[in-house]
Image: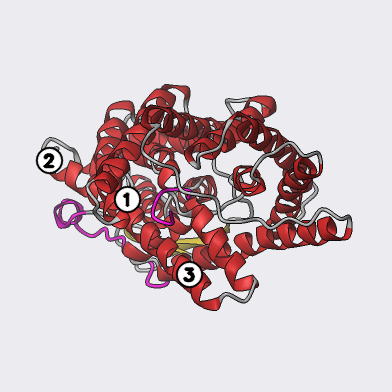
Amino acid sequence: MPPTAEDAHRAVDLSLRTGELLLSGGASAAEVTETCAAVARAGGLHRVECDITFTSITVSGHLPGDPAPVSGLRLVRFRELDYSRVSAVHALVTDLVEGRTTPVQADERLRSVAATRHPYGRVTVTVARALLAAAVALLLGAGPEVTAAAFGATVLVDLAIDALGRRGIPAFFQNAVGGFIATAVALGLVAADVGVRPSLVVAGGIVLLLPGVTLVGAVHDAITGFYVTASARAFETFLLTAGIISGIAVALSVGVRLGVPVRIWDPPATGLGDVPLQLLAAAVASAAFAVANHAPRRTLVPAALAGATGWAVLLGVEHLDLSATLGSATAAVLIGMASYTLAVQQRVPALVYVAAGIIPLLPGLTIYRALRRLSEGDTLGGITLLGTAVTIGVALAAGALFGEYLARALRRTASPVERRLTGLLRSRASRRAEPGATARPAAGGGPGRGFV
């Protein structure tokens, strides 16, 4: 029985709601575009077009023999990284495209996914974020006192921004409050003469807020041809970091007035003498990031191994006196290859492992240092560090994407569905396999070491 007009509208609606969950949960524009198109085609539409911007999704398609298109638009109003929900949507779409479920059943499953609670409780998420901060402090060379201070500061920051978020306060002001709290904790320790480096306390306390993932996402979207979305993500990176700096500046001004003047110096780079501790810290940081962003439980151990492996590759390249950017790119390629393989085996998006694996390598702190120097009038130093951060972000995004392509090429038995729904753009072969159905990307759509 050929699809009816009602089927067409249902297919467009299902495609839009699927895309909304993916885009709000942290998926790339390329993955959302291909997934929306696949859902619409599974509902009986042909000549499917999907356009993605940073805040909206548009899907259009035709019924067989009908020249009039059926289209719809959906806005993405809320964004929260939720890899468990993204994984559930990925499995649902795979079943739909492979014919194991009908569009009606998929619609019911999608409503269930959207209504499902997060797999981890609020306390667990807060502890995971604090562990992420503590692990990053260790990567920066912090001792036990600073690590504990970074843990405590992050708990306060997380509670504060969660309360502000539930009241609808924009992310800029949330980051400003978070930066203020982290700096206030550092000033309090200085006033109490605890004997810690305030720079490391602040660095660990604000790591929860640093938009390194957003920068890598912007580069990924730009590489895959979604320039409007990439530009929006890049500006979001700038704005969120500016919020952090504003909060830090206010806290420092208050400290000076209270007689606790302190300069937040750049944190020192760590050496190679404590490699086992660094590898452990990188593994904890990746696993903690996965928990904090609601990744499925079965992905936590692989995510930790990915983080430790990536950091080991980076240290190895640095030990050979090669470029830190080359080290980041090499580590990202290996993470991308492993992520694709694990994603196929466990039926989760490669994004889950890529995002967690590159967490120790992200240039978030370099972005912060660059904008802080710009705010202090050091234009040359700020631009130099900003260029370094962008270079590392490009290396990570390009390396991870290339690693996924390479793993796909080596996996000769991969099905067309696997190739389309793992975050990669479709190949010409998969396009030819579906005559009359097209989906194109939207035309609009030390400093070198990780957090240091």
Label 1 and label 2: CA atoms lie apart by 22 Å
State the separation of the CA atoms marked 1 and 3: 23 Å
Image quadrant assignment for residue 280: top left
Up the image or down, 295 lies above or below 264; here it is above
Look at the image and tell me in which quarter the N terminus lies: top left
- Type of amino acid under label 3: Ser
Query: Can residue 117 be seen by looking at this rendering?
Result: no
Tell me where residue 124 appears, x and y as whole percent: 63, 25
| Other residues around mark 2 within 10 Å, as few (<14) / some (14–19) / many (≥20) | few
Q: Residues within 10 Å of mark 3 (few under 14, many from 20)?
A: some
- Check whether the beta carbons of the residues at disc 1 and disc 3 lie within 8 A of each other: no
Disc 2 marks which residue?
410
Who is closer to the viewer here, 320 or 248?
320
Q: Can residue 432 be found in the magenta stretch?
A: yes
* Image quadrant in which you'd find residue 299: top left
- Tell me the magenta residue range: 427-452
| Label 1 crowd (10 A; few <14 / some 14-19 / many >=20) | many
Tag 1's secondary structure? helix
| Camera-side residue of 84 and 383 | 383
- Residue 305 in view in this figure: yes
Q: Position of residue 19 (x, y in %)?
A: 47, 50
Marks 3 and 2 sit apart, C-alpha to C-alpha, by 33 Å
- 42 lies left or right of 407: right
Q: Position of residue 121 (x, y in %)?
A: 65, 25
What predominant SS class does the magenta segment belong to? loop
Q: Count the marks.
A: 3
Label 1 or label 2, whichever comes before in sequence order: 1
Q: Residue at x 36, y 56 (%)?
A: 30
Q: Is residue 451 magenta?
A: yes
Mark 1, residue position: 328
Q: In the rendered structure, find residue 231 and report the number of the disc placed on it.
A: 3
